[in-house]
Image (cartoon, helix red, strand yellow):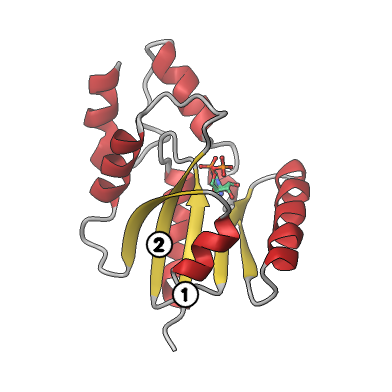
Amino acid sequence: MKKIAIFPGSFDPITIGHVDIVQRALPLFDQVIIAIGTNSQKKYLFSLAERLALINECFKNEEKVITDTFKGLTADYANEKKSSYLLRGVRTSPDFEFEKTIAQLNKSLSPQLETILLVSQPQYSHVSSTIVREIIVHGGDVSPFVPAAIVAAIKAKQ
Ligand code: ADP
């Protein structure tokens, strides 16, 4: 059976930290689906279409990566995609506490679903979509934090 992992997140926008998690997961799975979850309560800087286009640009040469969007529970989406693995990244202790709760919740909603947590490499542990958005809003240089392939597209937004 194909090993399919779902990497759910907001990706507003995708950063070098997200890309590192995906690249490290690729040898472990046959397919990684980067899935943008849509939460009507949350306000995003980039539209869903923009976030999807930025992710597609980063992985256009990677056959094992698929991109998608979903609404509703991540566990339901994983079942729909016949995926038994949720992939998430951990940078800090608060990240771990948060991810642990979500992983336990998803396991109780869907007992066959395993969450795989990859610990951030030290050079990426300070990188987040939040800081990238702050830099964009204040007109700074995002290039140290986002993949080279999307720097121009992000600068266009500024
Ligand atoms: P969410 O809103 O679901 O947290 P994000 O797009 O912010 O979505 O993050 C998606 C996942 O990527 C989360 O598991 C988050 O911890 C992880 N992540 C974000 N930035 C990094 C990073 N720099 N290194 C490792 N993991 C990261």
Image quadrant containing the N terminus = bottom left
Residue at 28% in and 32% down:
151
Number of dots carrying numbers: 2
- Which residue matches tag 1? 82
Residue 28, horizontal then vertical, whole percent: 48, 76
Residue 75, horizontal then vertical, whole percent: 59, 61
The answer to whether the residue bearing label 2 lies less than 8 angstroms from the nearest atom of ligand 1 is no
* Secondary structure under the numbered disc 2 in the rendered image: strand
Kindly identify the amino acid type of the residue bearing the numbered disc 1: Lys
Residue at 53% in and 44% down:
124
Kindly identify the amino acid type of the residue bearing the numbered disc 2: Ile
Residue at 38% in and 72% down:
31
Residue sticking out furthest to the top = 138
Image quadrant containing the C terminus = top left
Residue 44, horizontal then vertical, whole percent: 46, 26
On screen, residue 51 above or below 18? above
Residue 51, horizontal then vertical, whole percent: 34, 38
Which image quadrant shows ligand 1? top right
Taking depth in this image into account, of 52 and 109 the one nearest to the observer is 109
- Find residue 29 and name its label: none
To which quarter of the image does residue 74 belong? bottom right
- Which residue matches tag 2? 33
Give the Cα separation between the discs numbered 1 and 2: 11 Å
Q: Counting residues from the N terminus, which is met first, the one under dot 1 or under dot 2?
A: 2
Crowding near the residue tagged with mark 2, few <14, some 14–19, many ≥20 C-alpha atoms within 10 Å = many
Crowding near the residue tagged with mark 1, few <14, some 14–19, many ≥20 C-alpha atoms within 10 Å = some
Taking depth in this image into account, of 45 and 151 the one nearest to the observer is 45
On screen, residue 129 above or below 3? above
* Secondary structure under the numbered disc 1 in the rendered image: loop
On screen, residue 118 above or below 79? above
Residue at 68% in and 61% down:
106
On screen, residue 64 above or below 69? below
